[in-house]
Image (cartoon, rainbow, N blue to C red):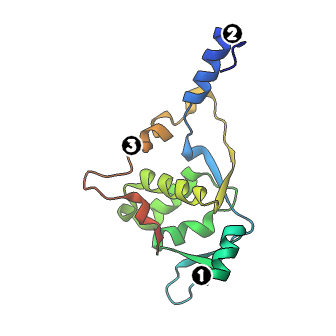
Amino acid sequence: MPAGLLHEEKEELMSKKKQSINYLDLIPQRAETLRWHTDEATGLITLEVENTGVFNTIAQKVFHKPRTTQVHLDETGSYLWPLIDGQKTVAQLADCMKQQFGEKAEPLYPRIIKYFQIVESYHFIKFAKQIHKPHGQQNTYLTFHLFRTAFYSSSGDDYRSYFLTG
């Protein structure tokens, strides 16, 4: 913290850091440069990630690493991927997933939020914008802080494995 900040300014900065992200209000958008295709036999989607940069170029030449890496999505990830259009919120996508898979989608919110955290961390998507609701209408019970500790169910399942495979 700069020494010249007043106490009120410090408190304001600290409170902004503590604000949580409501993933259900975010609008995901697929990366424009990411190529993908659907396997006609299985209906599953494969993302094709181009390995660029200095280290990848060296690895390709020296260790004969591939120019592209394929990321295979499972059934639920393959269902969600084409629905990511830059228009629907995560909550709307969760509703679509619930309608398509019913109880098989449960635990719905921790799984879908973890899915979006993973695909965002690999830059497969970005969040276009967040819907701003009036103060009384926030989904405060479904915030990032709740789900940071909810990635493991009581049976010990790791939700990271539900959407991305191989």
Q: Is residue 35 visible?
A: no
Q: Earlier in the sequence, mark 2 or mark 1?
A: 2
- Which numbered dot is residue 149? 3
- Residue 6 — which label? 2
Please name whichever residue, 122 or 79, is drawn nearer the observer in this view of the structure.
Answer: 122
Q: Considering only order in the chain, which callout, 2 or 3, is on the residue closer to the N terminus?
A: 2
Question: How many residues crowd mark 1 within 10 Å: few (<14), some (14–19), many (20+)?
Answer: few
Q: Amino acid at mark 1?
A: Phe
Quick one: which residue is furthest to the top in this view?
Answer: 7
Quadrant assignment for the N terminus: top right
What percent of the width, then of the height, locates residue 101?
Answer: 42, 66
Q: Which residue shows up at 67% across the image and 55% down it?
A: 126
Residue 17 sits in which quadrant?
Answer: top right
Q: Is 93 positioned to the left or the right of 105 in the image?
A: right
Viewer-nearest of discs 1 and 3: 1
Q: Is residue 67 above or below residue 112?
A: below
Q: Which residue is mark 1?
A: 63
How far separated are the C-alphas under marks 1 and 3? Answer: 39 Å
Q: Element at badge 2?
A: loop
Query: Can I make out residue 39 in this image?
Result: yes
